[in-house]
Image: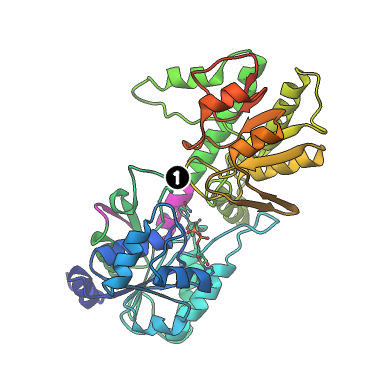
């Protein structure tokens, strides 16, 4: 079928289009590398000059992206990074992958998207495709992005194309990566969806077109709200099981042998990362504007948000069993990243727990092979090697992240007391081990 995006679709199919990615972080950099690997010319734009410099020197700062990939893409001329937004004028496609955090009041902070769209609007020209990938509330693409881009007179869906495509990348996942995770695409109109699907069709195995940008925006929020709510449920179950003297981990392991109708989620010290603790509140904020109260989201947020305090309570109980108090005890955290084998400590529960322990007078230290410095409000800690922690002396070891790199056998042997919030010591028992 002939439509306005046909010439762009043809250029994309021939991989002759000039692609661009704005925001070269956990989402944007892997995406840019996929475009380069497929043979596209890729311009990566970021406001962080250090990142741009590192990439142009062939160095990656994202664990899942090997430096060799960046070096190869720079050397074969397919990828260049820049802080210069005027390069947007040369591009056929522009993917926006900038942060979408919450304000202190838990309202969406769209300032990064707005800053980027202001730049795109300056250089927008006929035939370009703009795709928003940052997670956001339904309506952002057509209520916020579209009017800003149309302000110069070009019409979305006719003169240029606009779509939303949620990013599903799971840092640290060895099995699923950009290329083999199906990509949902919702355009402003049919030509926009067709253009976006043609772009992703070159780099991912499966493209899933949906009828609108709002559906695509909502898909991502359903996925992450589903996780937040189920984690909230299982965290509540963990608290309940403790009172009932039942091992919650054993319950989950047995339940997951059911081959249908059950999906395992695990309790933990609290939510972390740039997605699960944040995204559901984008949705509840938007729903509130329509007078709708998202009770599941609020309840899950309440339960998950209370987990760091619960962990501190468990540490208190563990120390109490040795006639010790939190005040003055040396408590060493194993892990500051929000999940195993990644370097991301944004919103990590380890940060809250460290802060709560410090407020109670503990002497807090931590080890994390991927997070050299932990900063959060007035908290600033520098990681120390595990050996150094043991030689300084540990009253209680607290497993906050189950990194594969930790030597758990050594930990069980050398720590006098352990609180394990991740079931990292599942096959070990001992009077000195306290589980969540
Ligand atoms: N990290 C994940 O696992 C993940 C997964 C799915 C979706 N997301 C979503 O993707 C989006 C990006 O997340 P991320 O984890 O990649 O963030 P990130 O912080 O790792 O990367 C964002 C990048 O954008 C850059 N940036 C900020 N303002 C800019 C501007 N005005 N112009 C150009 N560059 C700018 C930053 O310097 C940074 O390099 C968010 O909406 C997030 O919710 C993240």
Give whichever of 13, 215 is nearer the camera: 13
Residue 215 forms part of the magenta stretch: yes
The N terminus is located in which quarter? bottom left
Please say whether residue 56 is visible from this viewpoint: yes
Residue identified by numbered label 1: 223
The C terminus is located in which quarter? top right
Percent position (x, y) of residue 190?
29, 66
Percent position (x, y) of residue 134?
47, 61
Magenta range is 204-222
Point 70% across, 35% down: residue:
392
Give whichever of 242, 70 is nearer the camera: 70
In the depicted structure, whether residue 152 falls above or below residue 12: below
Q: Is residue 322 left or right of residue 234?
A: right
Q: In the structure shown, which secondary structural element does the residue marked by tag 1 occupy?
A: helix
In the depicted structure, whether residue 340 falls above or below residue 178: above
Please say whether residue 424 is visible from this viewpoint: no
Give whichever of 225, 389 is nearer the camera: 389
In the depicted structure, whether residue 256 falls above or below residue 36: above
Residue 395 forms part of the magenta stretch: no
Percent position (x, y) of residue 335?
58, 40
Point 38% across, 26% down: residue:
261
Q: Is residue 101 left or right of residue 35?
A: right
In the depicted structure, whether residue 36 falls above or below residue 255: below
Spot the residue most to the front: 391
Near mark 1 (Cα within 10 A), the count class, few <14, some 14-19 or many ≥20, is some
Give whichever of 390, 308 is nearer the camera: 390
């Amino acid at each position: 079928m002939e439509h306005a995006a046909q010439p762009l679709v043809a250029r994309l199919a021939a991989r002759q289009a000039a692609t661009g990615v704005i925001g070269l972080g956990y989402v944007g950099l892997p995406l840019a590398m996929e475009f380069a690997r497929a043979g596209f010319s890729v311009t990566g734009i970021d406001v962080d000059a250090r990142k741009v410099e590192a990439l142009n020197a062939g160095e990656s700062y994202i664990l899942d992206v090997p430096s060799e990939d960046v070096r190869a893409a720079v050397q074969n001329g397919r990828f260049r990074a820049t802080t210069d937004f005027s390069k947007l004028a040369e591009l056929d496609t522009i993917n926006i992958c900038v942060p979408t955090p919450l304000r202190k009041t838990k309202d969406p902070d769209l300032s990064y998207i707005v800053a980027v769209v202001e730049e795109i609007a300056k250089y927008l020209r006929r035939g370009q495709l703009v795709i928003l990938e940052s997670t956001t509330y339904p309506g952002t693409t057509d209520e916020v992005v579209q009017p800003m881009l149309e302000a110069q007179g070009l019409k979305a869906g006719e003169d240029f194309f606009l779509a939303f495509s949620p990013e599903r990348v799971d840092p640290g996942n060895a099995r699923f990566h950009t290329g083999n995770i199906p990509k949902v695409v919702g355009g402003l109109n049919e030509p926009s969806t067709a253009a976006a699907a043609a772009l992703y069709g070159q780099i991912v195995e499966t493209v899933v077109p949906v009828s609108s940008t709002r559906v695509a925006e909502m898909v991502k929020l359903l996925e992450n709200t589903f996780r937040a709510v189920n984690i909230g449920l299982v965290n509540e179950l963990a608290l309940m099981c403790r009172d009932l003297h039942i091992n919650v981990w054993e319950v989950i392991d047995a339940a997951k042998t059911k081959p249908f109708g059950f999906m395992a989620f695990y309790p933990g010290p609290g939510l972390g990362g740039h997605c699960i603790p944040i995204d559901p509140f984008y949705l509840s904020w938007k729903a509130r504007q329509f007078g709708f109260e998202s009770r599941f989201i609020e309840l899950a947020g309440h339960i998950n948000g209370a987990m760091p305090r619960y962990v501190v309570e468990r540490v208190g109980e563990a120390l109490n069993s040795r006639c010790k108090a939190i005040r003055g005890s040396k408590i060493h955290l194993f892990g500051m990243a929000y999940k195993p084998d990644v370097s991301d400590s944004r919103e990590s529960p380890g940060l809250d727990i460290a802060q709560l322990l410090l407020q109670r007078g503990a002497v807090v230290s931590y080890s994390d092979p991927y997070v050299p410095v932990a900063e959060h409000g007035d908290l600033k800690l520098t990681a120390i090697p595990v050996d150094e922690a043991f030689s300084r002396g540990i009253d209680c070891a607290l497993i906050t992240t189950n990194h594969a790199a930790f030597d758990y056998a050594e930990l069980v042997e050398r720590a006098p007391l352990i609180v394990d919030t991740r079931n990292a010591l599942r096959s070990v028992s001992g009077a000195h081990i306290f589980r969540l």
